Amino acid sequence: MPQTSSSSQMDSAVVSQDAPPVHAPAIASFVPDAGPTAQDGPPSPVRQYLSTRGNGGLADKTFAAAMLVCALSIFVIVLFILTVLILRSKLSLAQFGFHFFSGSDWDPVSGSFGALPFIFGTLATSLLALALAVPLALGVAVFLTELCPAKLRAPISFLTELLAAIPSVVYGLWAVFVLVPIMRDQLGPLLYQYLGWTGFFEGYNFGVGLLTASIILAIMILPIISSIARDIMLAVPVSQREAVLALGATRWEMIRTGVLRNARIGIVGAVILGLGRALGETMAVTMVIGNHPGISKSLFAPGYTLASVIANEFTEATGDLYLSALIEIGLALFLVTIVVNAIARALVWAVTRGAPARVH
Amino acid sequence: MAAVGASAQNITAAGATFPYPIYNKWFTEYNQLHPNIKINYQSIGSGGGIKQVSEGTVDFGASDGPMNDQQLAEAKVKVMHIPTVLGADVPVYNIPGVSKDLNFTGDEIADIYLGKITKWNDARLAKDNPGANLPDRAILPVYRSDGSGTTYIFTDYLSKVSPEWASRVGKGTSVKWPAGIGAKGNEGVAGMVRQAPYSFGYVELIYALQNKMAYGTVQNAAGKYLQGSPAGVTAAAAAAAKTMPADYRVSITNAPGAASYPISSFTWLLIPTHFNDPAKAAAVKGFLTWMLDRGESEATSMGYAPLPAQVQTMVRHTIATIK
């Protein structure tokens, strides 16, 4: 289990200090001044082992080269995907140009295609899902690392990870049969009554739409964000917490300045991973978003996402332009993911640039 | 069939999902009769079926909508259409408190999806359904979000009965729906209609029959309100058979005749006119002949409508021309 890993590392560090005396010369031999020439007695076991082996330099180079190939394969895969997406959507790129991304017409019959409602649907549901899931996930992570009684920790961790393992179609089914009726009959009317003045909860509420899709997405990304954030917080050294407490901080101040501030880059990383899943999620969203392309201020309105339209229409798409437009939707999803990630990274950089942990 | 020879024939085919259950049954039965002939069918969708047979990557394809002239001209393989069975779409709805089968006309259905009829107590719906206590509630139109032959048949019908539908929306496996929400697959539409009060949708007849769903009637070209059934579908095909073109690419929606169910359609196999391997040609011809002799009689029990007798005679002549 991840939460025990840091403590076991500490344990091993303690053990190695108390290591049996047999290893002591080996450790001493790594001190530069205490080379084997300065000592009588046999060379250390490690040195003996290394000297019996052949060409170490060659092995190092081979290993470095192999690792470089592994790293480069990421670039190759990304480039390959991008190339295929561009080549296969050439027809649509040539026909619509940039208007593909700003047009809001999607009409396979007349052959007029625009991706804007799908881009809107993808961004709106993903960002709303983040807004719902991040506070909850951080709450779970803080509770598990800082406040949770030992007895509860294992069951809660287990359930969070169980949530992450449920296939998305199961989430979709649950949403159709449980979430949609709740949205239609209880939550929706309540939101309209108290928050209707904002304009975000207007029009007919059929239970399916942007809000329902965002809620199911939030539930799906919650375990990812909370379990990564928990691991990051566990990695914050205990000495940090003790130092803050020693200065007279309350528990909340300790969590805020000692834990959250030190873990913030990792937490942002967890949020970005959650966002990545939300942007690309297809099945569960398709089942509850309404699949009607449109841009609406009301969260009760049906929407459509980039991933959903590909999944829905690709198998029966006839005609080269139609297929090409669907592949360009894939390209749009690829670009949206890159742009959103880039913005998130830039934000992290702007916030943390040259600034170590500090209180304000 | 003796001409097939003893060598094993592996035939690959791909296409429509709607007739997959009966095709699968046919191919399995035929393989049991002729162990050396194995037809491997992948239900990847009509679009994929047209594409693969056009490029010659499968031995034959299958589609719920006929190929258009441009597709036929661009295909690397010369393809002909062989009708196999027929299917239909039926209207389903969920109005709490109304258990009566409702009557619909084609232009009313079109106007529901155009967003022009928005309430269940609309004067036109009330006129067609005297005695049904239709409520003052908004209609939620539900359509298929995935591209499908079901949608093709449905929009083909609406294009014929509503000029506004023909000009604003048109027909296709996916169209730009003016109103409503999309759900994936027959089961998605049926599930959404079942659990969302005041909704309206369309599903395949075979799906409604298998799941024992109640569904409404649709007014046909002769003015009669008919409930979808294999008999009504075959009647529509028989009515259209008199004007059947030689390549079978015909739409039989809104067919004439008092017994014709209006939202009906053929589904086709896309067979190359010429096979490079004569043994393969003989195997395909053998299967198609068996389909007419024996296969058609299994259609009704599975919810499909069989080809009318006149069309079967025509198809028999066409099969003979495969080389």
Image (cartoon, coloured by chain):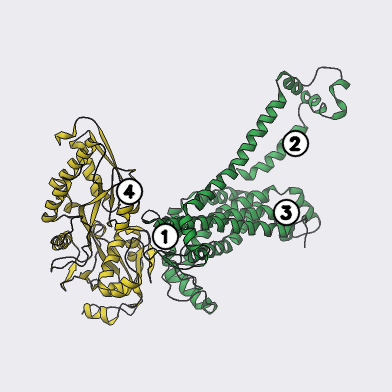
Labels 4 and 1 in the same subunit: no
Q: Is residue A320 visible?
A: yes
| Labelled pair 4, 3 in contact (Cβ < 8 Å) | no
Q: Position of residue B1 (x, y in %)?
A: 15, 37
Q: Position of residue B57 (x, y in %)?
A: 34, 43
Q: CA distance from mark 3 to mark 1?
A: 40 Å
Q: What's the residue at 20%, 30% (across, down)? A: B6
Chain A palette colour: green
Q: What's the residue at 62%, 59% (across, down)? A: A139
Chain B palette colour: yellow
Bin the neighbour count of mark 4 within 10 Å (Cα to Cα): few under 14, some 14-19, many 20 and up. many
Name which quarter of the figure residue B184 lies in: bottom left
* Amino acid marked by disc 2: Val
> Which element is circle 3 on?
helix
Sequence order check, earlier mark of 3 and 1: 3
Bin the neighbour count of mark 3 within 10 Å (Cα to Cα): few under 14, some 14-19, many 20 and up. many
Q: Position of residue B178 (x, y in %)?
A: 38, 71
* Residue under label 2: A14
Labels 4 and 2 in the same subunit: no
Name the chain letter of the residue that bears numbered label 1.
A
* Residue under label 3: A262
Q: Which mark is residue B54?
A: 4
* Amino acid marked by disc 4: Ser
* Residue under label 1: A287
Front position in the image: A130 or B164: B164
Name which quarter of the figure residue A51 lies in: top right
> Which element is circle 1 on?
helix
Bin the neighbour count of mark 1 within 10 Å (Cα to Cα): few under 14, some 14-19, many 20 and up. many
* Amino acid marked by disc 1: Met
**Is A80 situated left or right of A258 in this image?**
left
Q: Image height check: is B213 above or below A194?
A: above
Eye-nearest disc, 2 or 1 = 1
